[in-house]
Image (cartoon, coloured by chain):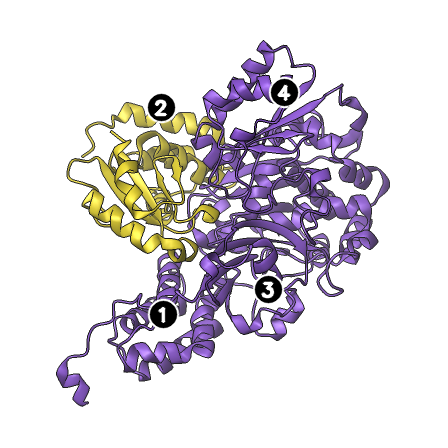
Chain colours: A yellow, B purple
Amino acid sequence: MNQEVKELDIISVVEKAIEEHGTRRDAVIPVLSEVNRAFGFIPAEALPEIRRRIHEPDEGVFLADSHLYSVASFYQMFSLHPLGRHVVRFCESAPCHVQGGRQVIKALQDELGIKPGETSADKKWSLIMTSCLGICGVGPVFIVDEDVIGNVTPDQVHEILARYQ
Amino acid sequence: MAETKSRKSIRMMVLVSSDPVSLERGAGEVFRKFQEEIEAFDLSEEVSLTTIADVGCREDVPLVIVYPDAAVYGPVGMDDVHILVEEHLKKGRVVPGLLAVMHGPLPEIAWLNSRKGSLPAQKRIVLERAGLVNPESLEDYVVYDGYKALGKALTQMTPAEVIAEVDKAGLQGRGGAGFPTGRKWSFVVSAPGEPKYVICNADESEPGTFKDRLILEGDPFSIVEAMTIAGYAVGAHEGYIYIRGEYPLAYKRLENAIHMAEAQNLLGEHIFGTQFNFHIHLHAGAGAYICGEETALIESIEGKRGMPRARPPYPPTFGLFGKPTVVNNVETLANVPPIIRNGADWYHQFGSPKSVGTKVYTILGNVNFTGLIEVPMGITLREVIDIYGKGMKNGARLKLVQTGGSSGSIVPASLQDTPMDFESWRSAGASLGSGALLICDEHTCVVDLAKVLMQFFRFECCGKCTPCRVGTQRSYDIVSRISEGKASLDELEVLQKLGEHMTEVSNCGLGQTASTAVRDILKHFRAEVEEHITSHNCPVGVCPVAELTPAQYLV
């Protein structure tokens, strides 16, 4: 399914994460985060590798793949499928909304040609709606990859997105 | 400790803003350029250069502030650095052409001298150091009273005395519920079971709230110190900071603070040479609003879906890994060192008798100046808007204020003279919540606002209990239909009933408060909602109401 992600890479990423965060149950989410960061999503093949390595002193190997899947699918920062090269996360919470976010999301959708939750056909862009990012003082806010962009007006959207190749 | 650093013969102090927005706009390069230029002009002995965490929400970042002149430059680009160093730092002349336009007070810049008198009624306890010290320097923290409280607690006080002092100070939880902190701690002490844990809830995800981020980014050591004190008080040797995954800068600064404290034996084994040991784990979340609920947060640390537990038992008796656990909000913890350092009586001079201390608010929405303030409990909304918000944007009329984020109350303009403290607001039927003040002018449609809020809850509901899972979705459907002019008046009753049921039977705070805004809107703005339904008209012109068909006019 994911040709770019080799099994070898998965094992080395998982092992490095386990080395850093340990093998106890409180390592589950940090390890998933590392995997998500390394690949941009959590490949299904990574779950059994993580499951085999998490132990609790009293319980031994206690996780099931389904448990890991349930965790990976619960949190918004994890993705279970590959996203576009650039990910736009738009804050849809009330503070950004009353400061003009309604017009900005419309401009974003028009410019990208995709709806929230979609990835463009050329795999360049993904648009994700997210809850408050905690940068409300400069709303409306969106994040492209790791760049925070605040005080956005609809007519700036084209120019902002053009910076990304 | 405090004597280890002397303030050399520093003639000038240069502060470069380093909040995420500034960094994105090249504050890092500007900082390095300053280093080079200061070196080149041979000024390193006389000029100190530091970064500051937050300068408020300003457009003209990166900001560079030069003391003692308190000159604020911004936005500063790479090309400006050479001129600034030569003219201002070397020759002592302010460069007027590069000064930032001052359109309001700079509440985030906490320079003691210039702060006096210029910012009415602002009183900083929690944010005392934020913006003043380099958040990545333990020395700076220690120079400004850091670790005095822990030293005092460990060497001069018993754990019971620490709890008694916090209790006497009347410190209430700042996460929203306002539960007395001292009492929470004593529950944990008396709960059977070992080990005990201290958790700092830094999963601040209430929309409109970013006070905890600013505390963590601006003064991370204070949280490390406060958690250590809490650990000593309740007999815990391990603590967790659960921080939102969306706060990378705060994570980095906390990580650094923990390492530095460990290196100086202020954290770890035998702290201050005593028998007390304490370790802190930093745990990043992965994006879920519900994890701000304390039992969901605990589940999340344990590597599970962040779904709230059935309570009781509460965390003080059955918390992390089933052990007694203190869960405190960042702002609550940040109040602890000053209380221990100065005593409960000192703390009582701030705020009102029933709500002691200060409160950090975030001001947002349609005002001229948005940002963060720390003021004594009990000031009014009108004061906040006029003094700190510098009035409504474009002279518009205030329509409502949403307090405490999405789960908070909608307060109509008529309540703007009610003192803001836990007690007064409770009796006015509103909640203070997390301190977010979303100020909305007359161009805000209440139905549109309700729709955004219900969308939020529908999306963030964890799905564990039926009233919330179904109730948030059903409420959203009805509110959407109202905004499209497709609902009937009867549905308002359904909406109200749904809200009541959710409040009564939901498992956790999310479901219990999800309908607060809708309830308040129906209470204060019912006519406006009804107009959407009966006249197919959005008075503000925001909602996509469908036109009446000729046949409908006849009905």
Q: Judge whether B469 appears above or below A109 on screen.
A: below
Can marks 2 and 1 be said to lie on one chain?
A: no
Q: Amino acid at mark 1?
A: Val
Q: Which mark is residue A12?
A: 2
Q: CA distance from mark 3 to mark 2?
A: 58 Å
In the rendered image, the quadrant that contains the N terminus of chain B is top right
The residue where tag 1 is placed is: B447
| Marks 2 and 4 in Cβ contact (< 8 Å) | no
- Of labels 4 and 3, the one closer to you: 4
| Marks 1 and 4 in Cβ contact (< 8 Å) | no
Can marks 2 and 4 be said to lie on one chain?
A: no
- Of labels 2 and 4, the one closer to you: 4
The residue where tag 4 is placed is: B89
At x 50% / y 59%, what residue is drawn? B392
The residue where tag 3 is placed is: B382
Label 3: which secondary element: helix
At x 39% / y 80%, what residue is drawn? B527
Label 4: which secondary element: helix
Q: Chain of mark 3?
A: B
Q: CA distance from mark 1 to mark 3?
A: 24 Å
